[in-house]
Image (tube, rainbow, N blue to C red):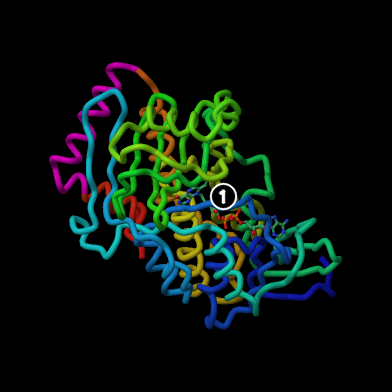
């Protein structure tokens, strides 16, 4: 391949939160690392997301400070509409300072991107080639970079044909809402026949992630503010009093897409949304992506330079991430399929499961630990 391309050990394509976290986690380990990201990241407006306590520990270790301005979650309230059963998970029960934190994704991404300036190569990947010896990418400005190991962290732009896809036929209506009786620090997840409705505390408002049938989304977006708020109230119930204000709303189609194998080609590993794009139920996507980055960094630190990108190393990554990836993908998929319907028997079973979680602390703590740290108790 091209002998004139710039050579490095690890080349990361995509400087979103997962790619940037990986670059930061590799600082100081003696490897030559480069990260390719266009100058301007496309921002789709405000996107508050919930990061777990486990992700907070990861981000702190990487030196990120953005979470200092995030809204802490002290309690998660889970319930279903039209049926009995609810469970409460509290920070005191889990003995952590907060179960999680709600932050605007672009604030976190900007913090991490600023920190990876030394590794940042400005550009967009337009072509990649790999063989047994190296991976070479070409950028839109003609620059060519050659690496022992290529890590795709581009959010899923580099599709191959190894994707598994489940289209739930749902969209999320997202926006910020204000209500009369806000409860500081409580996040709400309410399962309805159309899908889950989440309200995440975000400063003095709530970030709304309302799953609806995709065919219903345009009509909901077209409602005037007052009609929209009344529809939301009838869906969520009266626990937070009346909803009194909603910001600009948008809809996002919801799918599950994942690579059955995170090894995309010779010398190529895929992480974050590029490896798995999840339904936002239970807010797991970025939490899982950060664990991809940290596990990969740990493996690279323990691998001799000349072995980077070799088949044995790629296989070790696949094995290492198998349990956490598949358990998290399976959990979100099961929640959507079991909870997004109006079947009477399933409604009863859901109620029984929620009540059991509430009444049996060890079961609740086991579930909450999985949400906070993933299937492998990281970090
Ligand atoms: C409605 C909704 C709510 C969500 N809520 C939560 C939540 O509460 N908690 C949670 O953990 N997750 C949540 N998620 C998921 C979370 O947003 C994603 O998992 C996360 O943003 C993925 O980060 P990433 O770095 O893998 O990808 P991205 O953020 O997509 O970053 C990819 C980067 O690659 C760059 N790129 C793309 N193509 C190229 C190229 N050719 N060359 C160079 N660079 C390129 C892009 O500019 C971008 O910066 C939610 C998602 C949705 C849709």
Q: Quadrant of the C terminus?
A: bottom left
Left/right of residue 273 with respect to residue 334 in the rendered view: right
* Label 1 Cα crowd, 10 Å radius (few <14 / some 14-19 / many 20+): many
Write down the quadrant of residue 112 in the picture.
Answer: bottom right
Q: Position of residue 275 (x, y in %)?
A: 56, 49
Near-viewer residue (247 or 273): 247
Residue at 58%, 23% in the rendered image = 215
Q: Is residue 109 visible?
A: yes
**Dominant secondary structure of the residues highlighted in magenta in the image:** helix
Q: Is residue 319 visible?
A: no
Near-viewer residue (332 or 246): 246
Could you tell me which secondary element the residue under label 1 belongs to? loop
Q: Position of residue 324 (x, y in %)?
A: 40, 51
Q: Which residues are magenta?
A: 343-364
Residue at 22%, 57% in the rendered image = 94
Q: Position of residue 172 (x, y in %)?
A: 52, 37
Residue at 73%, 63% in the rendered image = 38
* Residue indicated by mark 1: 275
In the displayed structure, 19 sits above or below 191; it is below
Residue at 43%, 30% in the rendered image = 230
Near-viewer residue (351 or 306): 351
Near-viewer residue (128 or 174): 174
Q: Position of residue 51 (x, y in %)?
A: 41, 57
In the displayed structure, 186 sits above or below 22; it is above
């Amino acid at each position: 391949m091209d002998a004139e391309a710039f050579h490095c050990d690890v080349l990361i394509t995509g400087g979103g939160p997962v790619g940037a976290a990986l670059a930061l986690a590799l600082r100081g380990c003696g490897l030559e690392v480069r990260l390719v990201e266009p100058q301007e990241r496309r921002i789709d407006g405000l996107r508050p997301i919930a990061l777990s306590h486990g992700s907070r520990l990861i981000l702190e270790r990487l030196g990120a400070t953005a979470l200092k301005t995030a809204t802490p979650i002290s309690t998660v309230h889970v319930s279903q509409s039209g049926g009995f059963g609810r469970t409460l998970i509290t920070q005191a029960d889990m003995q952590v300072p907060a179960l999680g934190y709600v932050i605007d994704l672009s604030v976190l991404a900007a913090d991490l991107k600023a920190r990876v300036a030394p590794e940042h190569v400005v550009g967009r990947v337009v072509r990649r080639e790999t063989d047994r010896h190296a991976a070479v990418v070409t950028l839109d400005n003609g620059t060519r970079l050659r690496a022992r190991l290529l890590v795709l962290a581009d959010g899923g732009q580099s599709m191959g044909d190894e994707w598994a896809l489940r289209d739930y036929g749902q969209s999320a209506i997202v926006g910020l809402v204000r209500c009369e009786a806000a409860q500081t620090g409580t996040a709400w997840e309410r399962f309805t026949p159309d899908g889950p409705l989440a309200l995440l505390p975000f400063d003095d408002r709530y970030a709304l992630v309302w799953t609806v049938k995709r065919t219903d989304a345009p009509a909901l977006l077209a409602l005037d503010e007052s009609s929209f708020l009344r529809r939301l109230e009838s869906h969520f119930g009266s626990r937070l009093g009346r909803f009194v204000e909603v910001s600009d709303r948008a809809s996002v189609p919801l799918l599950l897409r994942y690579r059955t194998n995170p090894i995309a080609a010779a010398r190529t590993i895929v992480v974050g949304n590029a490896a798995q794009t999840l339904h936002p139920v239970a807010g797991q996507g970025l939490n899982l992506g950060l664990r991809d980055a940290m596990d990969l960094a740990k493996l690279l630190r323990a691998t001799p330079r000349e072995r980077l990108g070799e088949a044995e190393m790629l296989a070790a990554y696949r094995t290492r991430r198998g349990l956490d990836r598949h358990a998290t993908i399976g959990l979100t998929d099961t929640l959507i399929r079991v909870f997004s319907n109006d079947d009477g028997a399933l409604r009863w079973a859901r109620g029984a499961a929620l009540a059991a979680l509430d009444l049996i602390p060890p079961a609740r703590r086991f579930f909450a630990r999985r949400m906070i740290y993933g299937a492998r108790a990281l970090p």
